[in-house]
Image (tube, helix red, strand yellow):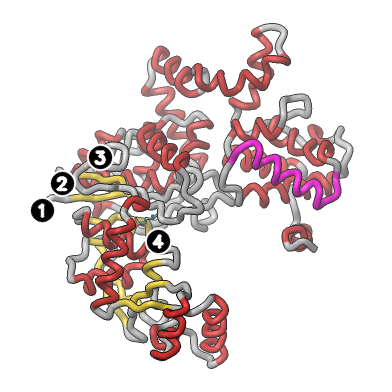
Amino acid sequence: MNVRTRIAPSPTGDPHVGTAYIALFNLCFARQHNGKFVLRIEDTDRARSTAHSEQVIYDSLRWLGLDWDEGPDVGGNYGPYRQSERGDIYAKHAQQLLDSGHAFKCYRTTAELVELREAIKASGENRALKPSDLILDEAEQQRRQKQGDAYVVRMQVPASGSVVVHDLLRGEIELHWDNVDAQILLKSDGMPTYHLANVVDDHLMEITHVLRGEEWINSAPKHKLLYEYFGWDMPVLCHLPLLRNPDKSKLSKRKNPTSILYYQRMGYLPEALLNYLGRMGWSMPDEREKFSLPDMLDAFDIQRVSLGGPIFDLEKLKWLNGLWIRESLSVEQLADKLIEWGLNRENLLSILPHIQQRMDTLSDFIPKTAFLGSGVLGITDQSFSELKLETADQLKILQFSLWRLETLSHWQRDNLFTELKFLADALEIKLKDFLAPLFIAVSGSTSSFSVMDAMALLGSDMTRARLRNGIDVLGGVSKKQMKSMEKAYRGINSGN
Ligand code: GLU
């Protein structure tokens, strides 16, 4: 068999370490079988996908040394590799399912869907929305069709019973249909959902093994059914364990930096980060902790993946990175790494416009920009003590900004300004006073250049890590305070 694996990231937001982790295992699996590793861009969410984010995915995976054989940027025989360019293919396949009766057009409005769900709940049942709930009588269907009402295409799913899905690592998994909705396959704008596009593409791209995150297990029954409806063989499924925070919760940017860009900016070596990702649920046969990608490729065996949730621990990563810096680099190589990391021309060109007018000598450069090259700043509560606002208000500003910026999808200076200005106005605090604690948390002092520019240069994960640190050094937020802050924050957002 010609083994073909793939990574299928969605280009929304920053490139996630979880994407690199899954890519690494797909790459190793493909190489071990002399197969091909494909990169497919899943950009059917047109509102959230950006070309910038797509480019950053390429750059950061390549920075890590994860190269693909086929993809939007390198071509291949199974393209296009960008889902937004495959609209006709999905429409054709959705039509095929409509023709065979395995899918139906659903004209239900949002309000009706809410009503239907409520009715199911009220009847004491705990189940998903099924075709029998959704399908209208013939006359009504005709009427809405004639009127040109919007519709989606949904798949037929069984009302009850269960299905067994085979997983390379987990064996047989039994999943129940009760909670599986009549999944939307084509949205009202004609765009496919993940499920349709993913299955059609995996088949047409002749993917033989789907190694993906554990969070997709619940999609497996729908996918299995779609393969059956189309009369296709299903690829082998393998759900890898999710990366977790030290408290065992799913690794999320709320608690931990998850962007590859953060790790780049912190000065982790790509070799070390990749090594660490290779240790997530996997180990070398001799249990050695430090190993390179070629070492991993030589020794790879998917059966050595253990399913207990691997903890993505920053301390451990830092320790490993230190080993790489101290043991594996000559002084010349270290100098090159530093230049590549922060002292390169491109980086200087993005920083200098902000400080040139504040410089008298070249030696001003390092002190004025040291905060950009640092990790989390060594600030204390004293650092905030000169500010006008009370500590409670400073905490509120930091926490509200953290929440507000968590959801910002385009991390650019002007957007940052809009969000922060919104909060300052909502809290009725003068912008200057509002920004002061942010200055301290993000830049270490109020005398540095615009904090919005600093945030834009630092990126979202680093900025958020510093805001969290600011909250900690100010004494943190108690559970009780958090409750009242959440309430106040909701009030702001609902315009009350
Ligand atoms: N686009 C999905 C994601 O962003 C792909 C999941 C899969 O591998 O099937 O994770």
In this figure, which residue is indicated by the disc labeled 4?
Answer: 191
* Region rendered in magenta: 411-429
Q: Which mark is residue 33?
A: 2
Q: Residue furthest left?
A: 1
Task: Using a 10 Å C-alpha cutoff, classify the residue at mark 4 as few (fewer than 14 neighbours), some (14 to 19) or many (20 or more).
Answer: many
Q: Which residue is mark 3?
A: 75
Mark 4 or mark 3, earlier in chain:
3
Give residue 1's mark. 1
Amino acid type indicated by mark 1: Met
Horizontal and vertical percent for residue 460?
A: 58, 41
Distance of mark 4 from mark 1, alpha carbons? 33 Å
Which of the image's four quarters has the C terminus? bottom right
Q: Is residue 1 left or right of residue 394?
A: left
Q: CA distance from mark 4 to mark 3?
A: 23 Å
Kindly identify the amino acid type of the residue bearing the numbered disc 3: Gly
Q: Is residue 165 visible?
A: no
- In the image, residue 138 sits, relative to residue 294, either above or below, namely below
